[in-house]
Image (spheres, helix red, strand yellow):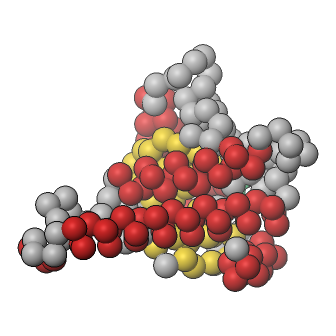
Amino acid sequence: MIKIIHGDITTLAVDAIVNAANQVMLGGGGVDGAIHRAAGRELYEACLKVPEVRPGVRCPTGEARITPGFKLPAKFVIHTVGPVYRDGNHGEPEKLAACYRNSLALAAENGCKSIAFPCISTGIYGYPIEDAAKIAVREVKEFLAAKNAKDAERDVACPHAPNGRAGAPRTPQIDVIFCCFSERDADVYRRILDLV
Ligand code: AR6
């Protein structure tokens, strides 16, 4: 299920909220700052422990890392780094799409049944909201469709297994929330949800 809400992502009692972080992963402005403030010092400490892949980079652009949520109502924070927008012709769409795909994959690996995304890259990083929302909605729809198809295939392959399922357990359905910080952004998502 996909839901669009207007609100503050730090208040959501979901399994995972996604943070629009930077590569150092030690906090910043925007939603990143809000998440670190609400989660408390332990989040900073947990981020410090994420190994650097090269000096000053814990999470390269387009990738994702997971930590506990600490004082947040959310169980996990999935930190991802969106692209800084230049003109859309410098790999930004692919990098932004990778943020959604990698965050969803990490949520699924960790058994999450619900995940909330902010509008990654559309604040300080300057990605136009319409373009970013199209990518966000497309990637989430594709991910959920692929997951459903895989689960259905598994059921057909092994109809007599307990619960009609094959040995490998079905991974849980995932509810995806797009948490917009303004009503205007939420409107853009609502419109795009029906188009993409
Ligand atoms: N809940 C939901 N959305 C929020 C919240 C909130 N509490 N606060 C802001 N937003 P931005 P970026 C929205 O700038 O563009 C940081 O310094 C905001 O209105 O947070 O990916 C990082 O450390 C916008 O729609 O992230 C990076 O350096 C969206 O979140 C850099 O900013 C994303 O805006 C990342 O920039």
Judge left or right: residue 153 versus residue 79.
left
Quarter that holds the C terminus: bottom right
At 26% from the left edge and 66% from the top edge, which residue is drawn?
Answer: 154
Judge left or right: residue 103 versus residue 76.
right
Residue farthest along the front direction in this orientation: 157
At 65% from the left edge and 68% from the top edge, which residue is drawn?
Answer: 137
User: x and y percent of residue 15 in the render?
Assistant: 40, 63
Vertical relation: 136 (above or below) 49: below
Q: Quadrant of residue 112?
A: bottom left
Vertical relation: 124 (above or below) 165: above
Residue 77 visible in the displayed image: no
At 78% from the left edge and 75% from the top edge, which residue is drawn?
Answer: 188
User: x and y percent of residue 77 in the render?
Assistant: 48, 52
Ligand 1 rendered quadrant: bottom right
User: x and y percent of residue 124 in the render?
Assistant: 80, 48
Vertical relation: 12 (above or below) 77: below
Q: Quadrant of residue 120?
A: bottom right
Judge left or right: residue 31 versus residue 108.
right
Residue farthest along the right direction in this orientation: 87
Q: How many numbered dots are placed on residues in this image? A: 0
At 36% from the left edge and 64% from the top edge, which residue is drawn?
Answer: 150
Vertical relation: 19 (above or below) 157: above
Judge left or right: residue 88 versus residue 148.
right
User: x and y percent of residue 82 in the render?
Assistant: 69, 45
Residue 140 visible in the displayed image: yes
